[in-house]
Amino acid sequence: MFFELIRLQYLKSVRSTAFAKSLMTNIFLGFIILLLLSYLLLAGLFLGRIIENFAEGQDPIAFLNSFLIFYFLTEFLYRYFIQNLPVVDLESLLHLPVGKRKIMHLLLIRSFISPLNIIALLIFLPFSIQSIAPEFGSMGALGWIGSLVLTSWILHWFMLWFKQRFEDSTLGLIIVMAVLVLGGGSTYLGWYNLDELTQPIFDLAVNSILPLAVLSLVFVGSYWLCFRYHVDNAYLEDLSSDNDSQVRGQSIGFLSRFGLAGELANVEWKLIVRHKKSRTYLMLSAFFLLYGLIFYTNPAYASEDGGISFIFVFVGVFITGIFMIQYGQLFLSWNSGSFDFYLNRKDGVEQLVRGKYLLFISISVICFLASVPYVYFGWQILLVHIATFLFNIGVLIHVIIYLALWKPKPMDLNKGAMFNYEGVGAAQWLMVIPMMILPYVIYLPFALLINDFAGLAALAIFGLFGILFYKKLSALNIRRVYQNKYEISSSFRQEL
Protein backbone atom coordinates (compact mmCIF):
# COMPACT_ATOMS: atom_id res chain seq x y z
CA MET A 1 0.00 0.00 0.00
CA PHE A 2 2.92 2.33 0.70
CA PHE A 3 4.14 2.06 -2.88
CA GLU A 4 0.57 2.46 -4.14
CA LEU A 5 0.41 5.84 -2.42
CA ILE A 6 3.66 6.83 -4.11
CA ARG A 7 2.18 5.77 -7.46
CA LEU A 8 -0.95 7.88 -6.83
CA GLN A 9 1.18 10.93 -6.05
CA TYR A 10 3.12 10.39 -9.28
CA LEU A 11 -0.08 10.08 -11.34
CA LYS A 12 -1.47 13.21 -9.73
CA SER A 13 1.56 15.15 -10.92
CA VAL A 14 1.79 13.89 -14.50
CA ARG A 15 -1.96 14.05 -15.17
CA SER A 16 -2.21 17.70 -14.15
CA THR A 17 -3.27 20.09 -16.91
CA ALA A 18 -0.37 22.32 -15.88
CA PHE A 19 2.17 19.48 -15.99
CA ALA A 20 4.21 20.94 -18.84
CA LYS A 21 4.37 24.37 -17.21
CA SER A 22 5.27 22.86 -13.84
CA LEU A 23 7.90 20.68 -15.49
CA MET A 24 9.66 23.67 -17.04
CA THR A 25 9.45 25.57 -13.78
CA ASN A 26 10.84 22.61 -11.84
CA ILE A 27 13.67 22.21 -14.35
CA PHE A 28 14.58 25.87 -13.90
CA LEU A 29 14.36 25.64 -10.10
CA GLY A 30 16.36 22.40 -10.18
CA PHE A 31 19.12 24.17 -12.09
CA ILE A 32 19.16 27.03 -9.55
CA ILE A 33 19.24 24.56 -6.64
CA LEU A 34 22.10 22.58 -8.20
CA LEU A 35 24.00 25.82 -8.75
CA LEU A 36 23.54 26.86 -5.10
CA LEU A 37 24.50 23.40 -3.84
CA SER A 38 27.65 23.48 -6.00
CA TYR A 39 28.60 26.79 -4.36
CA LEU A 40 28.11 25.21 -0.92
CA LEU A 41 30.31 22.26 -1.92
CA LEU A 42 32.95 24.67 -3.17
CA ALA A 43 32.80 26.52 0.15
CA GLY A 44 33.18 23.19 1.94
CA LEU A 45 36.29 22.33 -0.07
CA PHE A 46 37.96 25.57 1.02
CA LEU A 47 36.54 25.64 4.56
CA GLY A 48 39.83 24.57 6.11
CA ARG A 49 41.76 27.38 4.41
CA ILE A 50 39.09 29.91 5.34
CA ILE A 51 39.33 28.92 9.01
CA GLU A 52 43.14 29.16 8.90
CA ASN A 53 42.89 32.74 7.64
CA PHE A 54 40.30 33.76 10.24
CA ALA A 55 41.80 31.86 13.17
CA GLU A 56 45.52 32.03 12.58
CA GLY A 57 47.41 30.12 15.24
CA GLN A 58 44.31 28.32 16.57
CA ASP A 59 43.27 24.71 16.16
CA PRO A 60 40.91 24.69 13.10
CA ILE A 61 38.84 21.80 14.47
CA ALA A 62 38.27 23.37 17.89
CA PHE A 63 37.59 26.74 16.26
CA LEU A 64 34.96 25.25 13.94
CA ASN A 65 33.35 23.25 16.76
CA SER A 66 32.92 26.47 18.75
CA PHE A 67 31.01 28.08 15.86
CA LEU A 68 28.78 25.15 14.90
CA ILE A 69 26.01 26.47 17.17
CA PHE A 70 25.69 29.52 14.90
CA TYR A 71 25.41 27.26 11.86
CA PHE A 72 22.54 25.41 13.53
CA LEU A 73 20.86 28.71 14.48
CA THR A 74 21.09 29.73 10.83
CA GLU A 75 19.70 26.37 9.78
CA PHE A 76 16.80 26.80 12.19
CA LEU A 77 15.92 30.12 10.54
CA TYR A 78 16.17 29.06 6.90
CA ARG A 79 14.28 25.83 7.61
CA TYR A 80 11.50 27.90 9.17
CA PHE A 81 11.10 29.99 6.03
CA ILE A 82 11.85 27.37 3.36
CA GLN A 83 10.95 23.91 4.69
CA ASN A 84 7.47 22.78 3.64
CA LEU A 85 5.02 20.95 5.87
CA PRO A 86 4.18 17.37 4.84
CA VAL A 87 0.45 17.92 5.33
CA VAL A 88 -0.18 19.91 2.16
CA ASP A 89 -1.70 16.86 0.47
CA LEU A 90 -3.34 15.47 3.59
CA GLU A 91 -6.85 16.59 2.70
CA SER A 92 -6.67 14.73 -0.61
CA LEU A 93 -5.59 11.48 1.10
CA LEU A 94 -7.49 11.23 4.38
CA HIS A 95 -10.79 10.27 2.73
CA LEU A 96 -9.19 7.23 1.08
CA PRO A 97 -9.61 3.75 2.63
CA VAL A 98 -5.96 3.78 3.70
CA GLY A 99 -4.54 3.71 7.20
CA LYS A 100 -3.66 7.17 8.50
CA ARG A 101 -0.31 5.90 9.75
CA LYS A 102 0.74 4.78 6.28
CA ILE A 103 -0.26 8.13 4.81
CA MET A 104 1.72 10.01 7.45
CA HIS A 105 4.80 7.81 7.00
CA LEU A 106 4.65 8.57 3.27
CA LEU A 107 4.36 12.32 3.77
CA LEU A 108 7.12 12.46 6.39
CA ILE A 109 9.53 10.38 4.33
CA ARG A 110 8.76 12.46 1.25
CA SER A 111 9.46 15.64 3.21
CA PHE A 112 12.86 14.23 4.17
CA ILE A 113 13.91 13.95 0.51
CA SER A 114 14.98 17.57 0.23
CA PRO A 115 18.11 19.53 -0.75
CA LEU A 116 18.01 21.12 2.70
CA ASN A 117 19.06 17.80 4.24
CA ILE A 118 22.33 17.55 2.33
CA ILE A 119 23.55 21.10 2.97
CA ALA A 120 25.42 20.13 6.15
CA LEU A 121 26.98 17.17 4.34
CA LEU A 122 28.18 19.32 1.41
CA ILE A 123 29.71 21.98 3.66
CA PHE A 124 31.39 19.84 6.33
CA LEU A 125 32.19 16.47 4.69
CA PRO A 126 35.25 17.87 2.81
CA PHE A 127 36.55 19.36 6.07
CA SER A 128 36.16 16.04 7.89
CA ILE A 129 38.15 14.28 5.16
CA GLN A 130 40.83 16.96 4.80
CA SER A 131 41.37 17.97 8.45
CA ILE A 132 39.82 15.49 10.88
CA ALA A 133 40.65 12.15 9.22
CA PRO A 134 44.45 12.78 9.08
CA GLU A 135 44.55 13.68 12.79
CA PHE A 136 41.89 11.44 14.35
CA GLY A 137 41.51 8.68 11.76
CA SER A 138 38.52 7.63 9.69
CA MET A 139 36.45 6.68 12.74
CA GLY A 140 36.98 10.13 14.24
CA ALA A 141 35.96 11.78 10.97
CA LEU A 142 32.91 9.49 10.69
CA GLY A 143 31.84 10.20 14.29
CA TRP A 144 32.20 13.96 13.77
CA ILE A 145 30.43 14.30 10.43
CA GLY A 146 27.80 11.75 11.49
CA SER A 147 27.01 13.71 14.65
CA LEU A 148 26.80 16.95 12.73
CA VAL A 149 24.52 15.58 9.99
CA LEU A 150 22.27 13.84 12.53
CA THR A 151 21.88 17.14 14.40
CA SER A 152 20.82 18.76 11.14
CA TRP A 153 18.30 15.97 10.46
CA ILE A 154 16.92 16.24 14.01
CA LEU A 155 16.25 19.91 13.22
CA HIS A 156 14.27 18.70 10.19
CA TRP A 157 11.82 16.71 12.32
CA PHE A 158 11.74 19.41 14.98
CA MET A 159 10.84 22.06 12.39
CA LEU A 160 8.01 19.90 11.01
CA TRP A 161 6.54 19.76 14.50
CA PHE A 162 7.27 23.43 15.25
CA LYS A 163 5.67 24.80 12.07
CA GLN A 164 2.62 22.59 12.43
CA ARG A 165 2.25 23.68 16.04
CA PHE A 166 3.12 27.38 15.89
CA GLU A 167 3.21 28.62 12.29
CA ASP A 168 -0.30 30.08 12.37
CA SER A 169 0.19 31.91 15.65
CA THR A 170 1.99 35.04 16.75
CA LEU A 171 3.87 32.94 19.30
CA GLY A 172 5.69 31.12 16.50
CA LEU A 173 7.01 34.39 15.05
CA ILE A 174 8.02 35.57 18.54
CA ILE A 175 9.98 32.35 19.08
CA VAL A 176 11.77 32.67 15.75
CA MET A 177 12.71 36.30 16.41
CA ALA A 178 13.82 35.37 19.94
CA VAL A 179 16.09 32.66 18.54
CA LEU A 180 17.61 35.21 16.18
CA VAL A 181 18.05 38.03 18.71
CA LEU A 182 19.01 36.00 21.77
CA GLY A 183 21.03 33.47 19.78
CA GLY A 184 23.28 35.94 18.00
CA GLY A 185 22.92 38.89 20.35
CA SER A 186 23.83 37.08 23.55
CA THR A 187 27.27 36.17 22.24
CA TYR A 188 27.82 39.51 20.47
CA LEU A 189 27.01 41.47 23.65
CA GLY A 190 28.89 39.05 25.90
CA TRP A 191 25.87 37.81 27.84
CA TYR A 192 26.52 34.15 27.22
CA ASN A 193 28.85 32.18 24.95
CA LEU A 194 26.60 29.87 22.97
CA ASP A 195 29.57 27.82 21.79
CA GLU A 196 29.62 26.25 25.25
CA LEU A 197 26.41 24.40 24.35
CA THR A 198 27.71 22.39 21.39
CA GLN A 199 31.51 22.53 21.40
CA PRO A 200 31.98 19.78 24.03
CA ILE A 201 29.70 17.44 22.04
CA PHE A 202 31.64 17.76 18.79
CA ASP A 203 35.01 17.80 20.54
CA LEU A 204 34.03 14.43 22.03
CA ALA A 205 32.71 13.16 18.69
CA VAL A 206 36.20 12.95 17.15
CA ASN A 207 37.42 10.71 19.99
CA SER A 208 34.35 8.69 20.91
CA ILE A 209 31.38 7.02 19.21
CA LEU A 210 29.12 8.04 22.11
CA PRO A 211 27.78 11.34 20.60
CA LEU A 212 26.97 9.55 17.33
CA ALA A 213 25.10 6.78 19.17
CA VAL A 214 23.15 9.22 21.36
CA LEU A 215 22.22 11.47 18.41
CA SER A 216 21.09 8.41 16.44
CA LEU A 217 18.65 7.58 19.21
CA VAL A 218 17.52 11.21 19.38
CA PHE A 219 17.01 11.19 15.59
CA VAL A 220 14.78 8.10 15.76
CA GLY A 221 12.94 9.50 18.76
CA SER A 222 12.37 12.89 17.10
CA TYR A 223 10.94 11.17 14.02
CA TRP A 224 8.58 9.12 16.19
CA LEU A 225 7.41 12.15 18.18
CA CYS A 226 6.86 14.12 14.97
CA PHE A 227 4.96 11.18 13.48
CA ARG A 228 2.78 10.78 16.57
CA TYR A 229 1.93 14.50 16.68
CA HIS A 230 0.90 14.59 13.02
CA VAL A 231 -1.14 11.39 13.31
CA ASP A 232 -2.96 12.66 16.39
CA ASN A 233 -3.85 15.94 14.64
CA ALA A 234 -4.65 14.62 11.16
CA TYR A 235 -8.41 15.15 10.96
CA LEU A 236 -10.29 16.95 8.23
CA GLU A 237 -12.51 18.81 10.69
CA ASP A 238 -9.42 20.07 12.54
CA LEU A 239 -7.87 21.32 9.32
CA SER A 240 -11.00 23.22 8.30
CA SER A 241 -11.58 24.66 11.77
CA ASP A 242 -7.98 25.91 11.89
CA ASN A 243 -8.46 27.80 8.65
CA ASP A 244 -11.62 29.41 10.00
CA SER A 245 -10.09 30.36 13.33
CA GLN A 246 -7.04 32.04 11.83
CA VAL A 247 -9.00 35.12 10.75
CA ARG A 248 -10.99 35.75 13.94
CA GLY A 249 -10.18 39.05 15.57
CA GLN A 250 -7.65 39.95 12.88
CA SER A 251 -9.28 43.18 11.67
CA ILE A 252 -7.42 46.46 12.00
CA GLY A 253 -9.98 48.71 13.66
CA PHE A 254 -9.03 52.16 12.34
CA LEU A 255 -9.20 51.03 8.69
CA SER A 256 -12.98 50.69 8.90
CA ARG A 257 -13.19 54.49 9.23
CA PHE A 258 -12.26 54.85 5.56
CA GLY A 259 -15.51 53.48 4.18
CA LEU A 260 -15.68 50.57 1.75
CA ALA A 261 -12.01 50.92 0.83
CA GLY A 262 -11.13 50.54 4.52
CA GLU A 263 -13.33 47.45 4.83
CA LEU A 264 -11.60 45.90 1.81
CA ALA A 265 -8.23 46.80 3.35
CA ASN A 266 -9.33 44.80 6.40
CA VAL A 267 -10.30 41.91 4.12
CA GLU A 268 -6.84 42.14 2.53
CA TRP A 269 -5.26 42.05 5.98
CA LYS A 270 -7.22 38.91 6.81
CA LEU A 271 -5.98 37.40 3.55
CA ILE A 272 -2.41 38.15 4.59
CA VAL A 273 -2.58 36.56 8.04
CA ARG A 274 -4.63 33.59 6.85
CA HIS A 275 -2.54 32.30 3.94
CA LYS A 276 0.94 30.86 4.06
CA LYS A 277 2.59 32.80 1.25
CA SER A 278 1.34 36.25 2.23
CA ARG A 279 2.03 35.54 5.90
CA THR A 280 5.62 34.63 5.02
CA TYR A 281 6.02 37.97 3.23
CA LEU A 282 4.76 39.75 6.34
CA MET A 283 7.24 37.91 8.57
CA LEU A 284 10.11 38.60 6.17
CA SER A 285 9.18 42.29 6.24
CA ALA A 286 9.60 42.29 10.02
CA PHE A 287 12.89 40.41 9.68
CA PHE A 288 14.29 42.83 7.06
CA LEU A 289 13.72 45.79 9.37
CA LEU A 290 17.12 44.74 10.76
CA TYR A 291 18.68 45.33 7.33
CA GLY A 292 20.14 48.65 8.44
CA LEU A 293 22.40 46.96 10.97
CA ILE A 294 24.47 45.65 8.07
CA PHE A 295 25.20 49.14 6.72
CA TYR A 296 24.78 51.66 9.53
CA THR A 297 27.30 49.86 11.75
CA ASN A 298 29.84 49.24 8.96
CA PRO A 299 32.74 51.74 8.94
CA ALA A 300 33.16 51.15 5.20
CA TYR A 301 29.94 53.09 4.56
CA ALA A 302 30.70 55.97 6.93
CA SER A 303 31.16 59.40 5.35
CA GLU A 304 34.41 61.19 6.23
CA ASP A 305 32.88 64.69 6.02
CA GLY A 306 29.96 63.86 8.31
CA GLY A 307 27.56 63.63 5.40
CA ILE A 308 25.41 60.76 4.25
CA SER A 309 26.63 57.76 2.31
CA PHE A 310 24.69 57.40 -0.94
CA ILE A 311 23.98 53.71 -0.17
CA PHE A 312 21.89 54.81 2.83
CA VAL A 313 19.20 56.08 0.46
CA PHE A 314 18.63 52.58 -0.88
CA VAL A 315 18.69 51.16 2.66
CA GLY A 316 16.09 53.71 3.77
CA VAL A 317 13.83 52.93 0.80
CA PHE A 318 14.17 49.22 1.54
CA ILE A 319 13.48 49.44 5.29
CA THR A 320 10.54 51.86 5.23
CA GLY A 321 8.90 50.26 2.19
CA ILE A 322 9.82 46.59 2.43
CA PHE A 323 6.26 45.28 2.78
CA MET A 324 4.97 47.51 -0.01
CA ILE A 325 7.81 46.34 -2.26
CA GLN A 326 7.40 42.63 -1.54
CA TYR A 327 3.64 42.36 -1.34
CA GLY A 328 2.88 45.08 -3.88
CA GLN A 329 4.81 43.44 -6.70
CA LEU A 330 2.02 40.81 -6.89
CA PHE A 331 -0.64 43.47 -6.54
CA LEU A 332 -3.73 41.74 -8.03
CA SER A 333 -2.37 38.18 -8.07
CA TRP A 334 -3.26 37.90 -4.39
CA ASN A 335 -6.90 38.27 -5.42
CA SER A 336 -6.77 36.02 -8.48
CA GLY A 337 -9.33 33.63 -6.97
CA SER A 338 -11.85 36.38 -6.18
CA PHE A 339 -11.19 39.00 -8.87
CA ASP A 340 -14.46 38.24 -10.71
CA PHE A 341 -16.35 39.00 -7.50
CA TYR A 342 -14.95 42.54 -7.41
CA LEU A 343 -15.36 42.90 -11.16
CA ASN A 344 -19.11 42.29 -10.91
CA ARG A 345 -19.68 44.80 -8.11
CA LYS A 346 -20.30 48.51 -8.59
CA ASP A 347 -17.00 50.30 -7.95
CA GLY A 348 -15.67 46.96 -6.69
CA VAL A 349 -12.34 47.15 -8.53
CA GLU A 350 -11.82 50.81 -7.61
CA GLN A 351 -12.44 50.17 -3.92
CA LEU A 352 -10.23 47.07 -4.00
CA VAL A 353 -7.32 49.06 -5.42
CA ARG A 354 -7.85 51.94 -2.98
CA GLY A 355 -8.08 49.45 -0.12
CA LYS A 356 -4.70 48.02 -1.10
CA TYR A 357 -3.25 51.52 -1.25
CA LEU A 358 -4.58 52.18 2.24
CA LEU A 359 -3.11 48.95 3.62
CA PHE A 360 0.30 49.56 2.01
CA ILE A 361 0.50 53.07 3.43
CA SER A 362 -0.62 51.90 6.90
CA ILE A 363 2.02 49.16 7.12
CA SER A 364 4.67 51.50 5.68
CA VAL A 365 3.89 53.90 8.54
CA ILE A 366 4.41 51.04 11.00
CA CYS A 367 7.73 50.12 9.31
CA PHE A 368 8.86 53.75 9.52
CA LEU A 369 7.97 54.00 13.22
CA ALA A 370 9.76 50.70 13.87
CA SER A 371 12.86 52.13 12.16
CA VAL A 372 13.02 55.27 14.34
CA PRO A 373 15.43 53.62 16.86
CA TYR A 374 18.06 53.73 14.09
CA VAL A 375 18.51 57.35 15.20
CA TYR A 376 20.93 55.79 17.69
CA PHE A 377 23.45 55.64 14.80
CA GLY A 378 23.00 59.36 14.07
CA TRP A 379 20.27 61.89 13.45
CA GLN A 380 21.20 61.79 9.75
CA ILE A 381 19.80 58.25 9.61
CA LEU A 382 16.43 59.50 10.87
CA LEU A 383 16.41 62.18 8.12
CA VAL A 384 17.14 59.49 5.53
CA HIS A 385 14.22 57.40 6.77
CA ILE A 386 11.83 60.37 6.81
CA ALA A 387 12.74 61.36 3.25
CA THR A 388 12.61 57.83 1.84
CA PHE A 389 9.36 57.09 3.68
CA LEU A 390 7.68 60.12 2.10
CA PHE A 391 9.10 59.16 -1.29
CA ASN A 392 7.84 55.60 -0.90
CA ILE A 393 4.23 56.46 -0.11
CA GLY A 394 4.14 59.44 -2.45
CA VAL A 395 5.90 58.18 -5.57
CA LEU A 396 7.31 54.65 -5.44
CA ILE A 397 4.00 53.05 -4.41
CA HIS A 398 2.39 54.21 -7.68
CA VAL A 399 5.34 52.99 -9.76
CA ILE A 400 5.32 49.52 -8.16
CA ILE A 401 1.56 49.12 -8.62
CA TYR A 402 1.73 50.36 -12.24
CA LEU A 403 4.38 47.76 -13.11
CA ALA A 404 2.58 45.02 -11.14
CA LEU A 405 -0.51 45.52 -13.32
CA TRP A 406 1.38 44.43 -16.42
CA LYS A 407 -0.06 40.99 -17.22
CA PRO A 408 -0.69 39.77 -13.64
CA LYS A 409 -0.76 36.00 -13.19
CA PRO A 410 -2.75 33.69 -10.87
CA MET A 411 -1.24 31.96 -7.85
CA ASP A 412 -2.12 29.62 -5.00
CA LEU A 413 -1.97 31.48 -1.69
CA ASN A 414 -1.62 28.31 0.38
CA LYS A 415 1.81 27.49 -1.01
CA GLY A 416 4.96 28.78 0.61
CA ALA A 417 6.84 31.87 -0.56
CA MET A 418 10.32 30.39 -0.94
CA PHE A 419 11.17 29.07 -4.43
CA ASN A 420 7.54 29.64 -5.42
CA TYR A 421 7.28 31.66 -8.64
CA GLU A 422 3.52 31.54 -9.12
CA GLY A 423 2.25 35.01 -9.97
CA VAL A 424 5.74 36.14 -10.97
CA GLY A 425 6.22 37.44 -14.49
CA ALA A 426 8.65 39.65 -16.39
CA ALA A 427 7.33 42.77 -14.62
CA GLN A 428 8.35 41.45 -11.20
CA TRP A 429 11.92 40.86 -12.39
CA LEU A 430 12.15 44.28 -14.07
CA MET A 431 10.55 46.10 -11.12
CA VAL A 432 13.84 46.17 -9.22
CA ILE A 433 15.37 48.54 -11.83
CA PRO A 434 13.13 51.60 -11.23
CA MET A 435 12.95 50.77 -7.54
CA MET A 436 16.74 51.14 -7.25
CA ILE A 437 17.31 53.88 -9.85
CA LEU A 438 14.35 56.26 -9.36
CA PRO A 439 15.31 57.50 -5.84
CA TYR A 440 18.82 58.27 -7.07
CA VAL A 441 17.54 60.09 -10.17
CA ILE A 442 16.05 62.63 -7.75
CA TYR A 443 18.62 62.46 -4.96
CA LEU A 444 21.99 62.56 -6.77
CA PRO A 445 21.65 65.80 -8.81
CA PHE A 446 20.83 67.82 -5.69
CA ALA A 447 23.37 65.94 -3.56
CA LEU A 448 26.17 66.52 -6.08
CA LEU A 449 25.32 70.15 -6.87
CA ILE A 450 24.51 71.26 -3.31
CA ASN A 451 24.91 68.63 -0.55
CA ASP A 452 23.47 65.37 0.77
CA PHE A 453 20.74 67.07 2.78
CA ALA A 454 19.49 68.90 -0.30
CA GLY A 455 19.16 65.52 -1.98
CA LEU A 456 17.10 64.22 0.93
CA ALA A 457 14.96 67.34 0.84
CA ALA A 458 14.30 66.75 -2.87
CA LEU A 459 13.20 63.17 -2.15
CA ALA A 460 10.88 64.36 0.61
CA ILE A 461 9.39 67.17 -1.54
CA PHE A 462 8.70 64.80 -4.43
CA GLY A 463 7.07 62.43 -1.96
CA LEU A 464 4.90 65.21 -0.53
CA PHE A 465 3.77 66.21 -4.02
CA GLY A 466 2.87 62.56 -4.65
CA ILE A 467 0.82 62.50 -1.44
CA LEU A 468 -0.98 65.74 -2.40
CA PHE A 469 -1.86 64.34 -5.83
CA TYR A 470 -2.62 60.86 -4.49
CA LYS A 471 -6.13 60.69 -5.97
CA LYS A 472 -5.01 61.59 -9.48
CA LEU A 473 -2.03 59.22 -9.42
CA SER A 474 -4.02 56.31 -7.99
CA ALA A 475 -6.76 56.99 -10.57
CA LEU A 476 -4.22 56.20 -13.32
CA ASN A 477 -3.72 52.69 -11.94
CA ILE A 478 -7.45 52.21 -11.34
CA ARG A 479 -8.18 53.22 -14.94
CA ARG A 480 -5.51 50.76 -16.11
CA VAL A 481 -7.20 47.92 -14.25
CA TYR A 482 -10.55 48.76 -15.85
CA GLN A 483 -9.00 48.97 -19.31
CA ASN A 484 -7.51 45.46 -18.97
CA LYS A 485 -10.11 43.90 -16.69
CA TYR A 486 -11.22 41.20 -19.13
CA GLU A 487 -7.66 40.19 -19.98
CA ILE A 488 -6.76 40.08 -16.28
CA SER A 489 -9.88 38.08 -15.42
CA SER A 490 -9.17 35.58 -18.20
CA SER A 491 -5.58 35.17 -16.99
CA PHE A 492 -6.76 34.52 -13.42
CA ARG A 493 -9.11 31.75 -14.59
CA GLN A 494 -6.23 29.70 -15.94
CA GLU A 495 -5.52 26.60 -13.91
CA LEU A 496 -2.22 26.65 -12.04
Image (spheres, grey):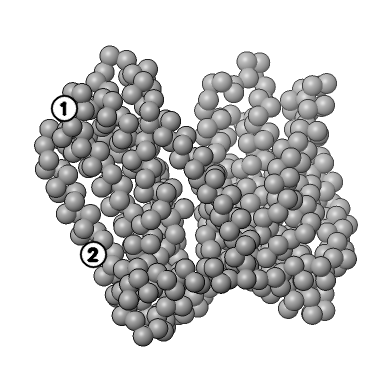
Q: Could you say which quadrant of the image residue 56 lies in?
A: top left
| Left or right: where 321 falls relative to 213 | right
Q: Are marks 1 and 2 in contact (CB under 8 Å)?
A: no
Query: Closer to us: mark 1 or mark 2?
Result: 1
Q: Which residue is tagged 2?
A: 224
Answer few, some or many: residues within 10 Å of disc 1's Cα (few below 14, many 20 plus, some between 14 and 19).
some
The C terminus, quarter of image? bottom right
- Front-most of residues 390 and 340: 340
| Residue at image location 78% in from the left, 67% down from the top | 488
Q: How far across and how far down the image is residue 34, in percent?
A: 49, 43
Residue found 56% across the figure and 55% down from its top: 26
Residue drawn 56% across the image and 52% down it? 27
Residue 466 image position (x, y, % from top left): 82, 48
Compared to residue 462, the image places residue 360 above or below, namely below
Which residue was labeled with disc 1? 136
Q: Is residue 396 above or below residue 481?
A: above
Circle 2: residue type: Trp
**Left or right relative to 439: residue 96:** left
**Cα distance between the residues tagged 1 and 2:** 33 Å
Q: Position of residue 132 (x, y in %)?
A: 22, 27
Residue 351 in view: no
- Lower sequence index among marks 1 and 2: 1
